Image (cartoon, grey):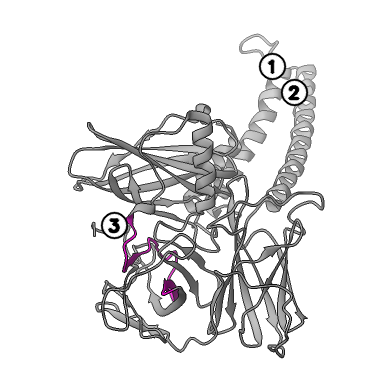
C-alpha cells in the first residue's frame, strides 16, 4: 500500500458520509435471494478507496452462509476478488455483517450469495463508488505528520553529511578541517535537494487535488440546464444534461429504468406543495423535453434520476421558474407520457403520528395507511410499511405502476436530501439489469439469481429506507388503482440516533 492510499485509509476514519442519491448515500435491498427473504443494507464510504459496510438479515430456519463480492463494471467477473464471508452478529440468529473495499471510482455491484446444505441464491445490488466529499486533514494528524516530516528532513541532511565527512575516518579520530568542510558542503547540498523535492512534491499534490476536485461528486450530478417555453397551449420544459460535465462530442448513453430514460421530479418551492413525476423525451444527444402538467406558476426544484450504460446512476438537480398556465389550444406540441403523474395542491398531506396508524385520505376515498411504528431516528429503519384500502374500507387492489407496486419520494425540508424509492429498494433497477446481463454474458448466470421483485403484495407496501440525517421530511407515496395514479403525502420528523442501529425484525 503506497503512502497516499494509507493516508486516505487513515483519514477515512473521520469522514461522515455525504451525497450519493442527493444526500442519501446508503443502498437498501428488500426481496428474495434464492428461496430466502432478505433485507440488505449497504453503507457506502464517502471516499475512494473506501470500505463499504454490509448488513444482511436473512429469514431462514436452517443454517446458512452469507458472502459478499464487489464486482466492478470495468473489470471482468473472472478477475473479481474472492468473496468475503459474512460474520453472524453475536447474539443474533439471522443477522450477518461484513465489509468490502471499493478500490476504484465507477459503477459496482455487490453480489450477495446465500447458501445452505439444500439451496443457494444470489442477488446483484448496484452501488456507485464515487468520492462525495473532500476530507479535511484532522489537526492532530496534520501536526503529527508535520513533526515527522521535519525529523525526516533534518535526519536526512545529517545522515548524508555524516557519510560525506566521517565515513573515511578511523574510529575515534577527530574531524579534520577537510572532513569538516565535506560535512557542511554535503549538509547544504542535501538541504537544497530535499527542499527542491518538497517544492516539486507540493506542486504535484496541488495538481492531484485539482484533478480530484474535477471528479468530486458533491450533491447532484451531472449538471443540468432547464428552461421553459410556451408552445401552443403547453409549457414545454427543455433539459440539457451534462453540458459541462461531458465533452461536446460525447454521447450520453443512458439505460432504460422502468422503461424510461429519465425520471424527473418537479417539486414546488419553498413549501413543496406541488409535485410532478415526469418522464422527458429525448430530442437530441443531451436534450430532453417534457410537457408540463397544470402545476401553479412559481419556482420549482428539479430532481432528475438517470442511469448510464456503465451502470453508474445519479440524480441531477437544478431550479426552474414555471410561467402561468397558458390558455388552452386546439393543438399540442407533444403528448404527455401516459405514466406522468402530479399533484398541484397538497391538501391531502397529513402529519405522521409515531405509535399509531396515520391515514392519508385521497380524493376518491382511497386510504393510504402508514402503519404504527416507533419514533423515527436517523440511520435506523424508517418503518415504511403502508396499507391501502378502497372507498369501502377493504384492501385495495393495487396495479403495477411502471412495473412496481409503488413509487415513493423522500425530501428534506431544505432540499438537501432526496431519494426515489421502490418496494425492492432505492438502487437503480436499470443498473441491476446491466449487471445481470454482464453476469449472464461472462459466466452464464448463477442458479437462484434474484431481482427482488417477488415480495410485492396486492394492498401492502414496504419500502426499505433509512433517513441519512435528522430533519423535517415530506414523503410522497404513489399508487395505482383503477388505472389512475394517486399520491399520498406524509410529513414527518426524524431525530438523531444515539447508538448503532439494529436491523428490523422480520415482518
Measured as percent of width and height from the top left, residue 22 is found at 55, 63
The one nearer the camera, 204 or 419, is: 419
Discs 1/3, front? 3
Q: Which residues are magenta?
A: 455-482
Report whether 496 appears left or right of 7: left
- Secondary element at tag 2: helix
Measured as percent of width and height from the top left, residue 4 is found at 60, 38
> Residue at label 3?
502
> Residue at label 2?
183
- Secondary element at tag 3: loop
First in sequence: mark 2 vs mark 1: 1
* C-alpha span from label 1 to label 3: 65 Å
- Secondary element at tag 1: helix
Report whether 348 appears left or right of 93: right
Residue at image coords 40%, 62%:
465
Asked if the stretch drawn in magenta spans residue 141, the answer is: no
Residue at image coords 31%, 80%:
358
The one nearer the camera, 55 or 356, is: 356
Amino acid at each position: 500500500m503506497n503512502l497516499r492510499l494509507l493516508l486516505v485509509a487513515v483519514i477515512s476514519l473521520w469522514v461522515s458520509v455525504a451525497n450519493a442519491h442527493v444526500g442519501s448515500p446508503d443502498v437498501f435491498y428488500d426481496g428474495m435471494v434464492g428461496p430466502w427473504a432478505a433485507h440488505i443494507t449497504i453503507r457506502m464510504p464517502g471516499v475512494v478507496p473506501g470500505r463499504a459496510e454490509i448488513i444482511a438479515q436473512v429469514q431462514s430456519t436452517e443454517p446458512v452462509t452469507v458472502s459478499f463480492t464487489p464486482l466492478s463494471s470495468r473489470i471482468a467477473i473472472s478477475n473479481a476478488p474472492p468473496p468475503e464471508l459474512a460474520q453472524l452478529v453475536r447474539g443474533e440468529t439471522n443477522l450477518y455483517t461484513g465489509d468490502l473495499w471499493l478500490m476504484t471510482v465507477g459503477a459496482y455491484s455487490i453480489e450477495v450469495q446465500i447458501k445452505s446444505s439444500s439451496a443457494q441464491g444470489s442477488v446483484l445490488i448496484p452501488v456507485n463508488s464515487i468520492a462525495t466529499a473532500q476530507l479535511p486533514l484532522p489537526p492532530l494528524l496534520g501536526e503529527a505528520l508535520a513533526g515527522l516530516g521535519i525529523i525526516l528532513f533534518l535526519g536526512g541532511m545529517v545522515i548524508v553529511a555524516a557519510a560525506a565527512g566521517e565515513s573515511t575516518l578511523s574510529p575515534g579520530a577527530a574531524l579534520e578541517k577537510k572532513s569538516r568542510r565535506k560535512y557542511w558542503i554535503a549538509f547544504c547540498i542535501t538541504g537544497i535537494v530535499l527542499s527542491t523535492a518538497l517544492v516539486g512534491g507540493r506542486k504535484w499534490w496541488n495538481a492531484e487535488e485539482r484533478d480530484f476536485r474535477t471528479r468530486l461528486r458533491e450533491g447532484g450530478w451531472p449538471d443540468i440546464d432547464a428552461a421553459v417555453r410556451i408552445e401552443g397551449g403547453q409549457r414545454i420544459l427543455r433539459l440539457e444534461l451534462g453540458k459541462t460535465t461531458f465533452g461536446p462530442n460525447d454521447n450520453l448513453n443512458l439505460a432504460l429504468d422502468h422503461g424510461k430514460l429519465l425520471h424527473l421530479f418537479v417539486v414546488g418551492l419553498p413549501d413543496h406543495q406541488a409535485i410532478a413525476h415526469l418522464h422527458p423525451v429525448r430530442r437530441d444527444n443531451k436534450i430532453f423535453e417534457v410537457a408540463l402538467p397544470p402545476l401553479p406558476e412559481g419556482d420549482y426544484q428539479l430532481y432528475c434520476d438517470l442511469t448510464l450504460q456503465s451502470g453508474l446512476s445519479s440524480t441531477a438537480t437544478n431550479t426552474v421558474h414555471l410561467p402561468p398556465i397558458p390558455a388552452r389550444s386546439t393543438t399540442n406540441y407533444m403528448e404527455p407520457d401516459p405514466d406522468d403523474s402530479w399533484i398541484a395542491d397538497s391538501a391531502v398531506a397529513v402529519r405522521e403520528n409515531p405509535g399509531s396508524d396515520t391515514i392519508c385520505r385521497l380524493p376518491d376515498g382511497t386510504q393510504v395507511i402508514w402503519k404504527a411504528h416507533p419514533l423515527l431516528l436517523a440511520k435506523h429503519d424508517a418503518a415504511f410499511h403502508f396499507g391501502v384500502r378502497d372507498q369501502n374500507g377493504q384492501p385495495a387492489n393495487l396495479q403495477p405502476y411502471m412495473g412496481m407496486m409503488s413509487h415513493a419520494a423522500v425530501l428534506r425540508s431544505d432540499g438537501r436530501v432526496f431519494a426515489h424509492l421502490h418496494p425492492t429498494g432505492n438502487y437503480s433497477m436499470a443498473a441491476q439489469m446491466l449487471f445481470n446481463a454482464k453476469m449472464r454474458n461472462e459466466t452464464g448466470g448463477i442458479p437462484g439469481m434474484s431481482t427482488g421483485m417477488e415480495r410485492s403484495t396486492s394492498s401492502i407496501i414496504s419500502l426499505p429506507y433509512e433517513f441519512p440525517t435528522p430533519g423535517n421530511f415530506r414523503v410522497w407515496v404513489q399508487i395505482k388503482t383503477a388505472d389512475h395514479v394517486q399520491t399520498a403525502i406524509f410529513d414527518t420528523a426524524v431525530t438523531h440516533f444515539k447508538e448503532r442501529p439494529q436491523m428490523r425484525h422480520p415482518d
